[in-house]
Image (spheres, rainbow, N blue to C red):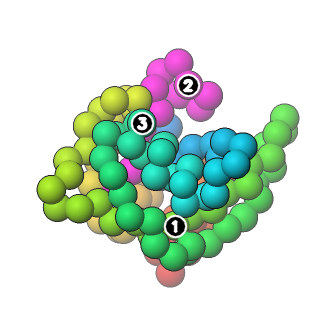
Amino acid sequence: MLITQRRPQAFMPLKWEFPGGKVEPGESDAQALRREIQEELGVAVTVGKEFMGLVHRYPDFDVDFHVYRCEIPASESPRRIAVQDFRWVELAELSGFDFPPADQPTIQKLLE
């Protein structure tokens, strides 16, 4: 799995997360995911089926969170463009990284 680390100046700095971001007006979830990964990591992805969705409530806002299975072509290599770092990890390694609370249900479901 590919995970990314937030930049030091970001909300919840240096926490690890699944790549993605905000959906802009007029975009589908898949379009936003492709755009965000291109902007953050410089790679084109194929967005597959939705794995899960949830709404996570933080004290000041809610996150409508959708997780998709994606593939990066073998010819593409991620780069640190708009992230602090990225890693390829095995499922069993996810619990060793500091993720935001909104990511915890996804991690739990992946580990099941």
Q: Name the residue beneath numbered marker 3.
A: 39
Rendering coords of residue 60 (x, y %): 84, 35
Instruction: Identify the amino acid type marked 2.
Output: Ala
Disc 3 versus disc 2: nearer the observer: 3
Look at 36% across and 58% down and name the residue there: 45
Q: Residue furthest bottom?
A: 112
Look at 56% across and 25% down and name the residue there: 10
Up the image or down, 53 lies above or below 94; here it is: below
- Residue 68, labelled with which disc? 1
Up the image or down, 107 lies above or below 21; here it is: below
Q: Earlier in the sequence, mark 1 or mark 3?
A: 3
Rendering coords of residue 47 (x, y %): 45, 65
Look at 56% across and 50% down and name the residue there: 32
- Residue 10, labelled with which disc? 2
- Camera sees residue 25: yes
Instruction: Identify the amino acid type marked 1.
Output: Tyr
Q: Which element type, helix, strand or loop, lies under badge 2?
A: loop
**What is the crowding at mark 2: few (fewer than 14 residues within 10 Å), some, or many (at least 20)?**
few
Q: Which residue is nearer to you in this view: 69 or 109?
A: 69
Q: Which residue is nearer to you in this view: 40 or 32?
A: 32
Q: Earlier in the sequence, mark 3 or mark 2?
A: 2
Instruction: Report the magenta residues as a range.
Output: 2-13
Q: Earlier in the sequence, mark 2 or mark 1?
A: 2
Q: CA distance from mark 2 to mark 1?
A: 23 Å
**What is the crowding at mark 3: few (fewer than 14 residues within 10 Å), some, or many (at least 20)?**
some
Quadrant location, the N terminus: bottom left
Q: Main secondary structure of the magenta part?
A: loop
